[in-house]
Image: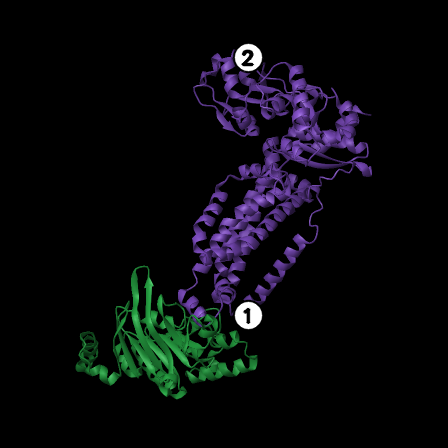
Amino acid sequence: MAEKSSIIVEFRAVNFQIGDAMIIDDLNLRIYKGEILILLGESGCGKTTTLKLINRLIEPTNGEVLVEGKATTDWNAIDLRRRIGYVLQEAGLFPHYTIAENVALVPRLENWEAEKIRRRTTEMLELVGLNPNKFADRFPHELSGGQRQRVGVARALAANPDLLLLDEPFGALDALTRVNLQKEFAALVKDLGKTAVFVTHDLHEAFVLGTRICLMDKGKIVLNDTPENFQKADLPLARAYLETVSSIERKI
Amino acid sequence: MNFFEFLQQNWSELLALTREHLYLVFVSTAIAVLIGVPLGVLLTRRKSLQTPVLGIANILQTVPSLALFGLLIPLAYIGGIGAKTAIIALTLYSFLPIIRNTVAGISGVDAKVKEAATAMGMTDWQTLKQVELPLALPVILTGIRVAVVIAVGVATIAAAVGAGGLGTYIFRGLRQNDNNLLLAGAISSAILALFADFALGQIEKLYALENLRNKASQNKRKFVLIGTAVLMTAIFVLPFVSNSRFQIPNSRNDSESGNQTIRVGSKDFTESIILAEIMAQTLEKRGITVERRYELGGNLAHEALLSNQIDVYPEYTGTAFTAILKRPPLTDTQKVYDETKAEYAGKFDLNLSPPLGFSNDFAILVRGEAARQNNLQTVSQAVPLSKNWQAGFGQDFMSRADGYAGFAKAYNFNFTKQPREMDLSLTYRALASGQIDLIAGNSTDGLIAALDLFQLADDKKYFPPYQAVFIARNDKSEVLRETFAKLHNAISTDEMRRLNYAVDGEKLAPKTVAAEWISRVYK
């Protein structure tokens, strides 16, 4: 029973089709509280689709996705999304909102008091390492890519959701910025006790961040294990991924 | 009179016309925005509607403006003559750029931004209001700017349905062969278009993303919003123009109140306006209130009479007989009059006045110099010479039953060059300047003498008679009877030619010419 109550997301025999194309094929997956689950795979493998099924940006063709024990289709989509943080590639910040307004988005939609919103925004900017005095009134186009991505994380955390969904958030950043953000993010999520589902095609990122890695191929999960066990896996696709990392290490 | 003297003398009228012009453009654009923007938003939500709706808007835009005005005239409620019809036509033209740019602006918002809005739990309405519309605004404003510039241009045509505006000067200038009028109308509307383009371009910049933070822009944006609100209120709430053509047509019959109002209409040429003005002033002398609805092109005056928007207008028996009753041309003057009167009474419940005394027949005209050189007197004499002539005729003459086809056949004309079909008033100029050699004008036209043109006699009696009469609604017959009797045989052909020349040649106002005639005849 204890284990069951700690399941935050569960996929039960989920299919997702567009026309005849099977994007997600009979997916079964449990995500537990406090995990950082990595969805790893090449583009087109269905990892982003899997992510979007969780906050009902799309709905399963067959089967069901349960969030906190309730099928997404039974949730009010708006309520569901507001209690799940979402971070996407290149941040997707509103270009006509200041940084503070971007961070305050969900609290404002939830009609928090102005003072509470202001405090929370300041807190969130500090949390992601941006000086509120310096950044609050700027606009997204005045920030670097890395800074924008920090704002994206602050925005996702602002309404204090238990669950964070991240769709290749660091994919478009240069290598140094990416490594810094990965480390900070991993620490942040652990400290805050959040659950995160993180989509990437970068095994190195998966190892740095993940407590569990789901390798996906053609709409199916082909490997679902801890980073330690992933390194020992025999699966050809997993070996191919490991090659990419070890070849770099050999060169170094 | 040079152009600047003209402006000096007429600036208050020019200003009034400009104000009417702006009124037409503002109201139609405002309506098009209020309908077009929500419609554009709907199209981004129901993508399957995009093709049909934008297709319809596209087709509307390709309908020639004069044709669209014509199509609207006979329609109940939305049609008729005056500002209302013009505003509807202008609104239809404004739809395409506004709807299209709304769709393009919203579709152009970064997909990542829209995905973020949805994923953060914004409702569709919140996404639209807080994200899509603000980001699409510069593109939507561009659409409005294009719509306004188009409307300023098209509104010049609105004068054809009696809606006023700067087109009044352009049409009048063409008709009276007056460059000052033409230039005043054309230059003013061009300046309006350029100014609107510039002003709206500046507003667009204020709403561009990079100016959002700029304090000065913020204040200017407030100013623009307040200004727009004030302007809209002024236009919709206050009776902006007291001119009668902006009042909603009143089809009530006031006869029992004893306070008679007669709505006098006219066609869109000088003679018709002078006759209408003579009618109007004669009625006013009797203490009857008159509303003037002049310059109705084509068959608009007839349509306006039928749809109870005017009570009386001057017409010609031949036109009524062939163009409206669609009867084959007859040459017997009395028979045409009698049959027209009978059929009008039976078919339309309309009343023909007794003849005014003159006929405005088709006049086959050549340059005076050509007539003298070749000693031409009749149309038949011109036939052998006409092989290499270029003829030019108004659209009306080319299409009507008693027009070109029958005429060429009756006289055995054999032009090697296809006759030019052009605006009637322009044929006079083209003939005088030697670009064409033969036209079909009107026998009472003042320009015949003014431009030294010569009328060839219709020796084969091809053209049916065009006796001038008034046509009135039967329910106004009682009021009009006395005036009809007074004007019976009151104007000779020479007299009419002189009156026309006073306006077209001497540039006097039709009002003045009519007043002068009345005071001379009814001392």
The residue that disc 1 covers is B215
Q: Crowding near pointer 2: few (<14 within 10 Å), some, many (20+)?
A: some
Number of marks drawn: 2
Q: Along the horizontal axis of the image, is A19 left or right of B426?
A: left
For the residue pair A26 and B358, the one nearer the viewer reads as A26
Position of B33 relative to B125 (above/below): above
Could you say which chain is coloured purple in the image? B
Q: Crowding near pointer 1: few (<14 within 10 Å), some, many (20+)?
A: few
Q: Horizontal and vertical percent for residue B137?
A: 50, 60
Work out how far the residue at label 1 is from the one at label 2, CA to CA, in angstroms: 79 Å
Q: Which mark is residue B376?
A: 2
The answer to whether the residues at label 1 and label 2 have Cβ atoms under 8 Å apart is: no
Question: Helix or strand or loop: what does disc 1 sit on?
Answer: helix
Quarter placement of the N terminus of chain B: top right
Label 2 marks which chain's residue?
Answer: B
| Residue type highlighted by circle 1 | Lys
Determine the residue positioned at 61% across, 58% down.
Answer: B228
| Front tag of 1 and 2 | 1
For the residue pair B317 and B198, the one nearer the viewer reads as B317
Could you say which chain is coloured green in the image? A
Q: Horizontal and vertical percent for residue A210?
A: 30, 82
Label 1 marks which chain's residue?
Answer: B
**Quarter of the image holding residue B85?**
top right
Q: Horizontal and vertical percent for residue B258?
A: 82, 37
Q: Which mark is residue A211?
A: none
Find the residue positioned furthest to the front: A1
What kind of colouring is applied to the model shown? by chain
Question: Helix or strand or loop: what does disc 2 sit on?
Answer: loop
Residue A169 seen in the figure: no
